[in-house]
Image (spheres, rainbow, N blue to C red):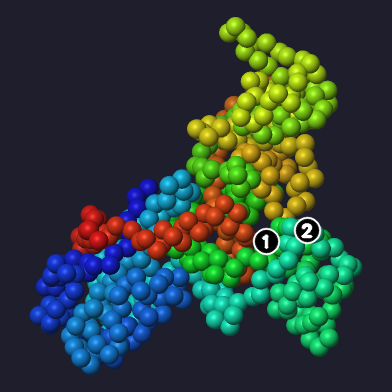
Amino acid sequence: MRYMYGMRAVLALPFLAFATLALPASGLVGPAQAQAVAAAASDAAVHRLAERLSRLAEDGLDPRWYAVPAADLAAADPARFRAETLRAAQAALTDLLLGRAGPIRGRVDLRRDTAAVPLGAWMAELASASDPATVIDRAADLPPDARALKAELARLRALAAAGGWPRISGNTRGTLEPGTMDAARVPQLRARLASIDPGLVEGPAANNPLYDDRLLAAVRLYQAAEGLEPDGRVGPITWDVLNTPIESRINQLRVALDMRRAQPAQPTERRIEVNIPHFRLHLLEGQRVVQDMAVIVGRRDRQTPMLNVRLTSVTFNPSWGAPERNAREDLLPRFRRDPAAMQAAGYRLFQRIDGEVVQVDATQVDFSNYNRNHFPYFVRQDAGDRNALGRMRFNMPNNDDIFMHDTPDRHLFSRGQRAFSSGCIRLERPMELLSEALSGTAGWDRARADRVLAGRATTGATLARSIPVRLHYTTTIVEGGRVVMRTDIYGLDADYARAMERGTPQRIASAEGGNARGAAAR
């Protein structure tokens, strides 16, 4: 993958009138250089271009990044106004086509194919167009779903300008149950959800402290729209989503637009894509969705990493060697509470003594002597129905020891937000994925897999065709023309928005290749 990014200085374009345009060291265009700029666009068209650049916020960009000249410069120095407007347009057009943000550490899921963008041709059109603002318009609408995302961005910006949505104060760690009275939180909840049902805040209803049926209906609609469990119970997760600042949602839309710029063509091969913040797995054949299932992903403090890997094998009836962190932080408290129950659940305690690994009877250990910083044992769980990995593990070699697996905790799939694991991906319907994964593997079919699982012995199967797996982080998607947003659970959209603020090393356009090559210092 090759990344090439936006610029702020003028592009060196050896075509049309820009062939004679040279910038002084200051980066500003003087009168002499301005005279060399072609007059393809009328003064009115240049004014329209400047006005369009001043509205780059509607495309998720910040006009301040491009030093768009003030309108009063046109009267004081028309040539300079023209040159600086065109220079700002070139920089903005580059970011609109290639994306504003550069590579971000750990974000191997981000994809751009800037080599496929004919940047030189776009720049030539911008230079020669009688109405260059229309070139900016077309570039801004290129990303997939751009119009739907921009419409939602405009809606939220207008809402923010009107004051945004109210923040709910008080006890947002406790759960508000339907049918209860709460003079502090219920009126605030009514005000927050008034956009769903204006009647919640009309007349005497505004200060009604009863969590009644009408408010319950609005809460359920809100929870469903946000991907939460629509049970009407307003607990910490729902409170957190309700109190997400509108500015954060605006930034998520800006990020969604930029992530889609210079997006490569979708692969045609069979593949698995796991969208972390949406908690969904899709098995795809080209654009066709073969399977769609819920998944459980890593908690905020144990995030699932973004990966591009391949599913190569399956392990049936796996045992589980608990990672050190899991043993210290998760299993030690359970051993301390009831070591006999842990052994009954198949957990085995081991210790290295004189170079040998020996099993230790957990019921004879005084666990009060140990804590998360001192626990000289390691833990393995036997294969079985209560094993943390369930009945099967899908192996995809990587340096983070991440895999997909079954789970005995089936009840968690009914939750809306499903960030519960220590980083691995738990599958809602592993048997369905298994059937697809084993397709074409000689000697293996669903019947044999069922027999192996019933036999309880740990067995492996290498897939005849490995399957590409992409773990990606996309909070904002468009389904049927509707924008669907999910919580930025790991803060990666916030990181991306900061990368957009920083920008990226500039690139110089090549007339021969039509692409951006070589770095220019900022």
Q: Secondary structure at mark 1?
A: helix
Query: x and y percent of residue 131 in the render?
Result: 31, 84
What residue is at 29 percent from the left and 64 percent from the top? 7
Which label sits on residue 91?
Answer: none
Name the amino acid, label 1. Asp
Mark 1 sits on what residue?
240
Residue occupying image coordinates x 73% and y 77%: 191
Residue type, numbered disc 2 = Gly
Q: In the visual, does 124 lie left or right of 224?
A: left
* Above-or-below relation of 235 to 181: above
Relative to 317, is 151 on the left or the right? left
- Report which quarter residue 185 is drawn in: bottom right
Disc 1 to disc 2, C-alpha distance: 11 Å
**According to the image, label 2 marks what residue?**
174
- Secondary structure of the residue carrying numbered label 2: loop
Query: How many callouts does the rendering have?
Result: 2
Nearest the eye: 212 or 8: 212
Give residue 249's position: percent from left, percent from top.
57, 67
Q: Quadrant of the C terminus?
A: bottom left
**Nearest to the observer: residue 339 or residue 1:** 339
Q: Residue at x 57, y 52 (%)?
A: 490
